[in-house]
Amino acid sequence: MSSVAELLSQAREAALEDAPLLLAHVLDKDRSWLLAWPEYQLQPSELRQYEQLLKRRQQGEPLAYLTGRKEFWSVELEVSPDVLIPRPETELLVAQALELGLPDQTRILELGTGSGAIAIALGGERPDWTITATDISSAALDIARKNILKQGRSNIRLAQGHWYEAVPHGHKYQLILSNPPYVAADDPHLLEDGLPWEPPQALGAGSDGLADLRTIISAAPAHLLPAGWLLVEHGFDQGRAVRKLFTKAGFTRVLTRRDLGGQDRVTLGCYPPSS
Ligand SMILES: C[S@@+](CC[C@H](N)C(=O)[O-])C[C@H]1O[C@@H](n2cnc3c(N)ncnc32)[C@H](O)[C@@H]1O
């Protein structure tokens, strides 16, 4: 038998910083409960589950996949290895979309929704907007559907398909946004920081990481209402290339925003050219 206090003390000595979160997850409690009940003795099955999760964490598996949860824009989302773990820097895409000050009843298209993080954040902030969120992966859409239902976002609908093929021909939107895959196929980061556990189709985008951004940007004008906006997330070193793609596609007011780390992260532009 092991108590909560003993396990927390062992974790501290071994510098296993996620251990309290895993222990709280196994016991289905929050971290404050661990402090309130240090003498609680774990059942053998609880101890076994905790030790297995700790081992997987030590082997590099991301915490969010072990607990099945990740917070984004103050919403707790369900995640699984079928979806990218939503990143804090993607909140910049949400913030920029809100800053455009678009009117009520705006029609939005989010391409590559994964867990539904971006659509759910926007749908919560602007219940009057209608959001179509797409993905190529049916497994990802299953997770997004669960999250949308759990958050009660009745203004979001889901569609499956390759980028714009997911939506009916001729449908146009005031805002299209996307956090597409943007990592180059040979980028060594793909082998680090838990990325090997994440879905490859959510990360890799051809030899220069721009393959999906090219498709999304070049085809966006055909899917935008007059003076519509396109917002995309991209890699810290892709700002210049992405701005060029926007300009080539006919966008104006093209600019790149930096994330909290001071890195180029989101580029936006308006179409067609405003006079
Ligand atoms: C970087 S993840 C972003 C997920 C989520 N929007 C987020 O920010 O956490 C990219 C998403 O695009 C989807 N995707 C990849 N290729 C696609 C394609 N050809 N058409 C539509 N979605 C695609 C992936 O399945 C994945 O869910």
Image (spheres, rainbow, N blue to C red):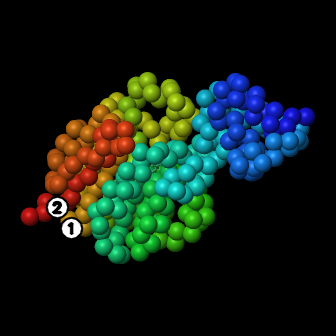
Q: Is residue 68 above or below residue 262?
A: below
Disc 1 residue type?
Pro
Q: Residue furthest front?
A: 36
Q: Is residue 93 above or below residue 98?
A: above
| Image quarter hosting the N terminus | top right
Q: How far across and how far down the image is residue 182, in percent?
A: 37, 39
Residue at the image position 30 percent from the left and 73 percent from the top: 103
Circle 2: element type: loop
Dot 1: within a 10 Å radius of its alpha carbon, few (fewer than 14), some, or many (20 or more) residues? some
Q: How far across and how far down the image is residue 90, in percent?
A: 42, 48
Circle 1: element type: strand
Q: Is residue 138 above or below residue 38?
A: below
Residue at the image position 31 percent from the left and 53 percent from the top: 231
Dot 2: within a 10 Å radius of its alpha carbon, few (fewer than 14), some, or many (20 or more) residues? some
**Residue 134, can we see it?**
no
**Residue 83, can we see it?**
yes
Quote the CA–CA distance across marks 2 and 1.
6 Å
Disc marking residue 226: 1
Residue at the image position 52 percent from the left and 56 percent from the top: 74
Q: Residue furthest left?
A: 275
* Camera-side residue of 144 and 100: 100
Label 2 vs 1, first from the N-terminus: 1
Disc 2 residue type?
Pro
Q: How far across and how far down the image is residue 2, in percent?
A: 86, 34
Q: Is residue 15 above or below residue 217?
A: above
Disc 2 to disc 1: CB gap under 8 Å: yes
Q: How far across and how far down the image is residue 47, in percent?
A: 83, 37
Residue at the image position 39 percent from the left and 34 percent from the top: 183
* Camera-side residue of 21 and 162: 21
Disc 2 marks which residue?
272
| Image quarter hosting the C terminus | bottom left
Question: Is 100 on the left or on the right of 78, as rendered?
Answer: left
